[in-house]
Image (spheres, helix red, strand yellow):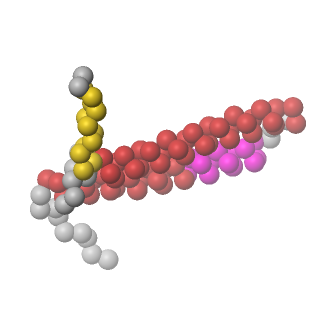
Amino acid sequence: MTAAPPPTTFAEGQRRLFGLLASTAGMFCGAASGLMIALLMWGGWSAREEHTIVVIFGWALGGFIIAMIAVIVGLLAGGPVGRFKVAAGRDGATIEADCQ
């Protein structure tokens, strides 16, 4: 396996960095989700606490996964060199899309 060529422009370097951050975020999300599920399955909860723990972990896991998906999409689509630009001011909000 050969190393990727060095970036020739600043934008290429930023895209590479944000691609690495997005893939790392996905791996972190998967590992943390697996850890939460393992803790839920083999945590040794009493029957009295089981329902409450399942509800708390379920909502936390769902929120965590949604938040990580938002971060990954934000990094890939709207990073500093992304294709979408969103601005909000006193006059309102604007969205620009770059089609190159």
Q: Is residue 95 above or below residue 8?
A: above
Q: Would residue 76 appear left or right of 15 to someone viewing this image?
A: right
Provide the major secondary structure of the magenta segment.
helix
Residue 45 visible: yes
Q: Position of residue 53 (x, y in %)?
A: 74, 35
88 magenta-colored: no
* Residue in the foreground of this view, choosing between 88 and 46: 88
Quarter in which the N terminus is drawn: bottom left
Residue 13 visible: no
Residue farthest toward the front in the current orientation of the protein = 91
Q: Position of residue 66 (x, y in %)?
A: 53, 44
Q: Is residue 94 above or below residue 24?
A: above
Q: Residue at x 61, y 43 (%)?
A: 62
* Residue in the foreground of this view, choosing between 94 and 64: 94
- Magenta span: 31-43
* Residue in the foreground of this view, choosing between 12 and 99: 99
Q: Position of residue 13 (x, y in %)?
A: 20, 55
Q: Is residue 12 above or below residue 68?
A: below
Q: Residue at x 68, y 41 (%)?
A: 58
Q: Would residue 45 appear left or right of 66 to someone viewing this image?
A: right
38 magenta-colored: yes
Q: Residue at x 24, y 22 (%)?
A: 90
Q: Residue at x 59, y 48 (%)?
A: 33
* Residue in the foreground of this view, choosing between 56 and 43: 56
Residue farthest toward the right in the current orientation of the protein = 47
